[in-house]
Amino acid sequence: MSYSGTIEYLYGLQKHGMKFGLDNIKRLMSALGNPERSFRSVHVAGTNGKGSTSAIIESVLRTSGMRTGIFSSPHLVSFTERIKIDGEEIGEKDVIELAAEVRSVADRLEAFHPTFFEVVTAMAFLQFRKMNTEWAVIEVGMGGRLDATNVIIPEASVITTVSLDHCEFLGHTEEEIANEKAGIIKDHVPVITAEQTPEVMDVIARKAAGKQSPLFRYNSEFSAHIVSEDPEKIIFDYSGGGKYTRLNPGLQGEHQMANAAVAVKTVEVIMDQYPATVFDIRTGVGNARLPGRIEMIRDDPPVLIDGAHNPSAVNALSVYLKRILSSKYGRIILVAGIMKDKDIDGILRPLLPLASEIIFTSPAYGRAAPPELLAARAGSLGYFSRQARKMSEALNLAENLFMPGDLIVVTGSFYTTGEAKEALGHRGIFARLRE
C-alpha cells in the first residue's frame, strides 16, 4: 500500500464513526494471531491524567532496562505519536506496512467493517509483537469497558482522575462515567487509582472487590507530598511500597505530582519480583515527556500549548499559569479553540480572568465551535475577545498583540494545539487523522 493509499484507507475508516463493543476487535485480534498476548501490559483509563501517567510508567520501565511500547491517543501533529517503541515514534514506513497488514486480514473477514480506532489498536499491538516488546503501556481511547483496547489482560489496571467528559457516550454523572472506566478491571488484576470523589471511588472499589482485584488508592495505600517548588517545577517525596525522596517530574504542573505517584505505585506493583531501583524511579520520573501538556513550543515569542479540553484539565492549567504569571510573565495572550460539544463555559471561566488578550479560533474539524460562538459566551461572562477563522491567523494576531514579557497560551482542545504546532513548523505525518 502506498502512502496515499494508506491515508485514504485510514481516513476512510472514520466514516464508520465510533462503535462501542469488543466483538469487532476480538475478531480482528484472532485473525491476526492474537498479538495482544505477546507482551505484558499496563492498561490506563481515566478522564484526566492518563496520558501523563502512561508516559511516566513507560519512562520508568524503559529506564529499568525493559523494551517498552506505548499506545496513546489522540496525536497532536503526527500519527506516529500514537505508537512508540522504547520512547521513539514508529516511522512512516511502519505505518504503511502495519495498515496494509491489518487491511489484508480485515478484508478477508466476512461482513466486517472495523472502525478507525479498532484498526489503529490492531496496528499498535502488531508493532509491539514485531518489535519483541516486553512491556506495553496501553492508554484507553474513550471510556474503558467497551473500548477496543479492553481486549488485553494487563498486569495492572490504572484509573486516573475521573470527571465529567464525553457525557454523550459515557453517561451524565460521575458514577456512570466511573462505571465505564472501571470496566477495564479484570479478575485478580491489581488496580491503582488516583484520588477520586467518594462517589467515583465507591464505584471503583465495588468493581475491584467483585473481581477480587487488590486496590491501591492515592492518599491511602500510597501518597506524595511537595517538599519544594518554584514557579515551573515541583519536587516531591513518595511513600508507598518504598520511599523515594526528591522526585522531580519532567512534566510541568503541580498536578503532575499525583500522576507521577500513581505511576510509581504501578511500577511497584508490577515489578514486585524485580523491583525498579531508586535510580530507575528518579530518572524515569524526571525524563518523562508528553507532547501538548504544558509544552513550550517556541521561545521567541514564547508560545505554550496545553490540550486541556474539560473543566478539570483547565483548572490544573490555570493553577500553573497563575504561578508563572506572577513570577515570570507580565501578560497572557490566550488563543483558544474548543469543541462545541464540550462544557464551554466551564472551560472558559478559569482561563478568561488570567488573560489580558483573548483570541478565539476554530480548528479545521467538524466538532469545533465557531469563534463567534466562543466570543459570545465570553461576552456573556463579561470579557472582550477577538476572533480568527484559522489557527495561523490567530497566531499572527497574537504576535501582533505581543509585547516583551508576554506569554502566548494556546489551549482548549488537542485539535487546537496540534494545529498550533503545525502552524509553527512542526511536520505532520497523517496529521488529518487526529480523532
Image: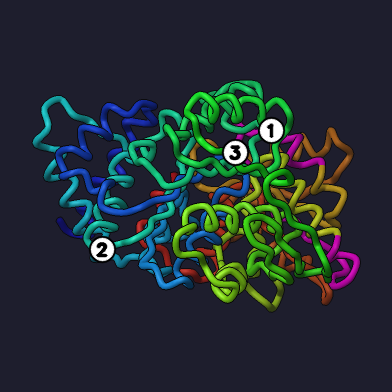
The quarter of the displayed image where residue 96 is located:
bottom left
Under tag 2, what secondary structure? loop
Q: Is there CB contact under 8 Å for labels 2 and 3?
A: no
N-term-proximal mark, 2 vs 1: 2
Callout in the foreground (3, 1): 1
Look at the picture and state if 296 lies above or below 272.
below
Q: Position of residue 281 (x, y in %)?
A: 58, 69
- From the image, tell me which residue sits under label 1: 343
**Residue matched to label 3:** 339
On the image, the x and y values in percent for residue 152 come to 35, 41
Q: In the image, which is nearer the foreground, mark 2 or mark 3?
A: 2
Going by the numbered disc 1, the residue's amino acid type is: Asp
**Residue 390 appears at what percent x and percent y?**
58, 53
Give the extent of the magenta segment.
323-349
Residue drawn 76% across and 34% down? 345
* Residue 284 relative to residue 337: left or right: left
The quadrant the N terminus occupies is bottom left
Residue highlighted by disc 2: 132
- Element under label 3? loop
Q: Residue at x 68, y 64 (%)?
A: 243
